[in-house]
């Protein structure tokens, strides 16, 4: 059931289109993307610590790489999860870093209950600002976004490799890739309104409060209808954490439409490898805390048919904090009848336009 609710954020009263149906297992839901922002709470931490698809892969990597090594856990969270798991895997010492002050203080309060606590050193701050010695042998960092680089992994882990790891040191995870496929947003949410889940409103408010003003947040789609995809997924962002890791990148690719339908944007999702030769975690087809991200392109949906081609340019450039990427998309849809449809999208980490696209005008109505 669709309704309009008002949220207050730093002097702004915003009308928000809300789906009031309670969230259910497997039911699609629309949220703002939250992982990029320092607004974590116990619920968000619990969704990560109980993510078996993710945790099994990280544990397997640590079991191979951590024994008798010094490990660095960047973004350790209130539970110091990977610092503790590294010690269980046989690491000599774990240095755990947390930038969110509330999470740091909770981690510090939890530390005495861990045995042996003297093998974990906990630091508050951004890893790119901290200096310490000796260097670590292995860096484990769960700062991967639903868009692979959205949480600043490329910049943070490039710095970690340069300043915090011994020569030849390794990073967990090994690789992260963002895939994109052509879709229409309404088809990802079948038989329900295109509206934010009611449970997501506190997080939407927190993002706007953190920034100070509203902006067009990235749209997280939980449990999307996989049958809505009009094409296969193609890589648009590649992060090789133990290889050629680039803090900025630009990729142009051709996406072939496979069946008739309507499209207005692309759905992106994560593939993640913690070890080079393992089966990747696939956030579209596996149950995990990483969700898909819908990026709008065309103001109105465009009819497509099998054989049509979407030429998509996907670029990531560092925003003003030097860590998080702004994403820029440019698309040309070539249809079989000779028509060409062009669209662009700027999706900054923060700031930028508000209500610039029709989807955001519908999600944040003025009346």
Image (cartoon, helix red, strand yellow):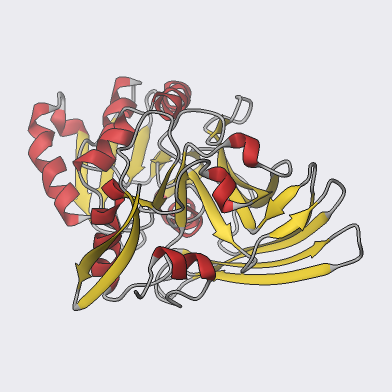
Front residue of 159 and 213: 213
- Locate residue 42 relative to residue 350 in the image: left or right: left
Residue 28 position, x and y percent, is 45, 39
**Vertical comparison of 324 with 280: above or below:** below
- Locate residue 68 relative to residue 99 in the image: left or right: right
Asked whether residue 82 appears in the rendered view, the answer is no
Front residue of 218 and 98: 218
Front residue of 8 and 248: 8
Q: In percent of the image, x 68 and y 55: which residue is there? A: 263
Front residue of 206 and 68: 206
Tell me the quadrant of the picture where the C terminus can be found. bottom left
Task: Tell me the quarter of the picture where residue 266 sits.
Answer: bottom right
Q: In percent of the image, x 43 and y 52: which residue is there? A: 160
Asked whether residue 95 appears in the rendered view, the answer is yes
Residue 137 position, x and y percent, is 42, 38
**Vertical comparison of 245 with 108: above or below:** below
- Locate residue 285 relative to residue 200 in the image: left or right: right
**Vertical comparison of 261 with 297: above or below:** above
**Vertical comparison of 218 with 292: above or below:** below
Residue 24 position, x and y percent, is 35, 31
Residue 173 position, x and y percent, is 49, 38
- Locate residue 202 relative to residue 58 in the image: left or right: left
């Amino acid at each position: 059931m669709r309704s309009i609710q008002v949220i207050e954020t730093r002097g702004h009263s915003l009308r928000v289109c809300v789906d009031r149906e309670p969230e259910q297992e497997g039911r699609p839901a629309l949220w703002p993307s939250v992982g990029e922002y320092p607004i974590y709470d116990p619920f968000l931490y619990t969704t990560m610590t109980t993510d078996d698809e993710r945790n099994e892969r990280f544990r397997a990597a640590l079991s191979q790489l951590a024994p008798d090594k010094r490990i660095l856990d960047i973004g350790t969270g209130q539970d110091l999860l990977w610092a503790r798991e590294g010690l269980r895997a046989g690491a000599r010492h774990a240095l755990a870093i947390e930038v969110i002050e509330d999470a740091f203080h909770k981690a510090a309060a939890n530390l005495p209950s861990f045995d042996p606590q003297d093998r974990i050193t906990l630091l508050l701050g951004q890893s790119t600002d901290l200096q310490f010695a000796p260097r670590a042998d292995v860096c484990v960092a769960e700062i991967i976004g639903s868009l692979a680089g959205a949480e600043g992994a490329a910049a943070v882990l490039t710095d970690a490799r340069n300043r915090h790891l011994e020569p030849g040191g390794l990073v967990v995870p090994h690789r992260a890739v963002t895939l994109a496929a052509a879709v229409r947003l309404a088809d990802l949410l079948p038989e329900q309104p295109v509206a934010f889940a009611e449970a997501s409103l506190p997080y939407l408010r927190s993002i706007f409060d953190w920034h100070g003003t509203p902006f067009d947040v990235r749209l997280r789609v939980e449990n999307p209808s996989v049958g809505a995809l009009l094409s296969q997924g193609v890589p648009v962002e590649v992060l090789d954490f133990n290889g050629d890791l680039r803090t900025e990148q630009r990729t142009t690719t051709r996406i072939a439409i496979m069946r008739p339908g309507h499209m207005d944007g692309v759905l992106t999702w994560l593939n993640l490898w913690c070890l080079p030769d393992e089966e990747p975690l696939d956030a579209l087809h596996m149950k995990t805390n990483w969700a898909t991200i819908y990026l709008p392109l065309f103001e109105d949906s465009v009819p497509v048919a099998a054989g049509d081609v979407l030429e998509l340019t996907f670029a990531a450039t560092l925003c003003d904090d030097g860590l998080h990427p702004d994403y820029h998309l440019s698309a040309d849809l070539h249809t079989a009848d000779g028509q060409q449809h062009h669209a662009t999208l700027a999706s900054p980490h923060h700031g930028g336009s508000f209500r610039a696209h029709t989807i955001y005008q519908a999600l944040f109505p003025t009346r």
